[in-house]
Structure formats: C-alpha cells, structure tokens
Image: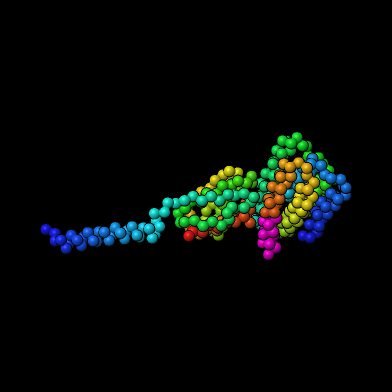
Amino acid sequence: MKRGVLTLVGIVLGANIAMTQTKLSDAEVAMVAVVANQIDISYAEIAKKKARNQEVKKFAETMLSDHNSVLGLAGDLAKKLGVTPKENSVSKSLLEQAEKIEKSLNSKRGKDFDSFYIDNEVAYHEAVIAAVEDLLIPETENKELRDLLKTAVPIFKTHLAHAKSVQAKVSK
Amino acid sequence: MISTKVKLRSVFLGSFIVLFGILGTNACGSSHSPETHVIVIKGLKFLPNELTVRKGDTVKWINKDLLDHDVTEEVGREWSSGVMKNEAIYKMAIEENTDYFCSLHVVMKGKVFVK
C-alpha cells in the first residue's frame, strides 16, 4: 500500500508536469504550492478527529499548524507580488487524487485509519519534496517565490522524518 | 596576658584558614560568574545542537523560525518552554546534563552538557 500511494502521487505530479510540455508559470507554481499545503491540511483535519494513536494525533496537529503557517506565507507573498495563483493540470490532478485519499481516510477506523494516514503522510511528503526540489524550484522565475519554496523544503523534510518515526511505532 | 606563643599560633592559624579559603574557592571555581549561552532555533534545528556550559550558567533559546516550536526535556518531560512563537525566548539555568527536543517536531533534538 505504501509503495502504491507513493507511486500514484509521484506519477500524478511527475507525469502531469511532463505532459503539459510547457513550463509552469509562477502563478501556476504558486497554485501547486497552495494546493499541496491545503491537501495536507485537509488530511490532518480528518486525522485530528479520527486518529486513535496519540502520536498520530499529535503529528496531525503539527501538520495543521505548520502547513497553515506555510500557506499564510504563500498568501502574503502572492499579495505582495500581485500574483494570483492559477489553476492548472497539476493542481487539478493533486486535488483529484486527494479526493480519493480523503474517501479512504473517511472509510477507515481505529488502527487501520492510523496506519493508512501515516503511510500516506510518508508517501505524500516524499512526493512533494521531490516535486518541489526537482520541478517547482527550477521552474520558478521569481526569486522570492523560489526562496519561499526553498524555505518549505526543510519543513517538509522534517515532517517526513517525523512521519517515518510515527510510522515505525504504529506498525509495531 | 596572652603569651607570645599563643599569639603567634593564633595568627598562624588565622592566616592558614584565610589562605586555604582563597585556594579552596579558586579550586572549586565557585567564584565563576554565571554566563548566558544562546541557542537559535532556525530551519527546524537547534543551533548549536550540542552545547557545553558550566553548572549554573543560563541557556537562552530564541525561536527564529516562522513555525511554532518548543523546548522540552526529552527523557521524563521534566520541563518545557511551552509553545514558542517566532521571536519567543525561553531561558533556563542549567544544573545537569540534559537532552531536550521539540515536542511539536519530535526529530528536532539537542543536548546541553555541564563541564
């Protein structure tokens, strides 16, 4: 399941960017960044209510706080730059995939829920880190937007390490 | 009347006590003035993440990240700063070696050693 989620998210992000054959504009990059954060916030809101394991619950609370902070920064920067995030095939694909994951999260309970949520968090953060580092940062023209994405990378990497430590405990 | 021998003995003993007191103080280092050391929280790291101080020194943690963090004793959660927002400061006098972490980002860890 873990590898399946990673493969799916990776394929969605990578394939969509490749398939567009055109560079993402800064407005489109901004939308992908906004959507990526909003998705993890929505997963965390479900987990905060449904998680049974206290470490999973605490992890979800951290995701809520941190991704809302990053979203706030992105919003402030977009206002400052006069950029309106623009919907695109990548952001749409992310949202379509997220809808499927949310359905799965809502259908699960107890330990199954905890395992599914944290496995998805590991896979999701791995895919987002790869997409930001390998695709979004190189595609971004505006230096401030690029700097914001670079600031987000250590946050996502810490989240990934945190998710893996919780995953190891949940799988015992 | 106090004999010269007794007087000399008293002076000798008194000097010995004063001298021993001075040497003892210097050897124990208890005349060291406590210092304040700074640990910056930035990029989801404690910088430096290992610090050596003298007993009684103060460590001051400053959150320079935009995210919330905290500083919590790791083993028994014996003390915690509580949530620290950006630019928040937490100070503590250090009496013994301590391992600490951020309970919001559990992989963020640090150590303070007492020399």
Residue at 76% from the left image edge and 45% from the top image edge: A33
**Residue B16 appears left or right of B45:** left
- Judge whether A35 appears above or below A105 on screen: above
What is the basis of the colouring in this image? rainbow
Residue at 67% from the left image edge and 47% from the top image edge: A66
Q: Quadrant of the C terminus of chain A?
A: bottom right
**Residue A69 appears left or right of B46:** right
Residue A92's spot in the image, x, y percent? 83, 45
Residue A154's spot in the image, x, y percent? 68, 51
Q: Quadrant of residue B89?
A: top right
Residue at 38% from the left image edge and 60% from the top image edge: B27
- Judge whether A165 appears above or below A151 on screen: below
Q: Is residue A142 magenta?
A: no
Q: Quadrant of the N terminus of chain A?
A: bottom right
Q: Is residue A168 magenta?
A: yes
Residue furthest toward the left?
Answer: B1
Number of on-image labels? 0
Residue A91 or residue A47, whichever sits in front: A91
Q: Say whether residue A45 is visible.
A: no
Q: Main secondary structure of the magenta part?
A: helix
Q: Say whether residue A10 is visible.
A: yes
* Residue stretch in magenta: A160-172
Residue B112 or residue A1, whichever sits in front: B112
Residue at 81% from the left image edge and 54% from the top image edge: A10
Residue furthest toward the bottom?
Answer: A172
**Residue A133 appears left or right of B61:** right
Residue A105's spot in the image, x, y percent? 75, 53
Residue A85's spot in the image, x, y percent? 78, 39
Q: Quadrant of residue A78?
A: top right
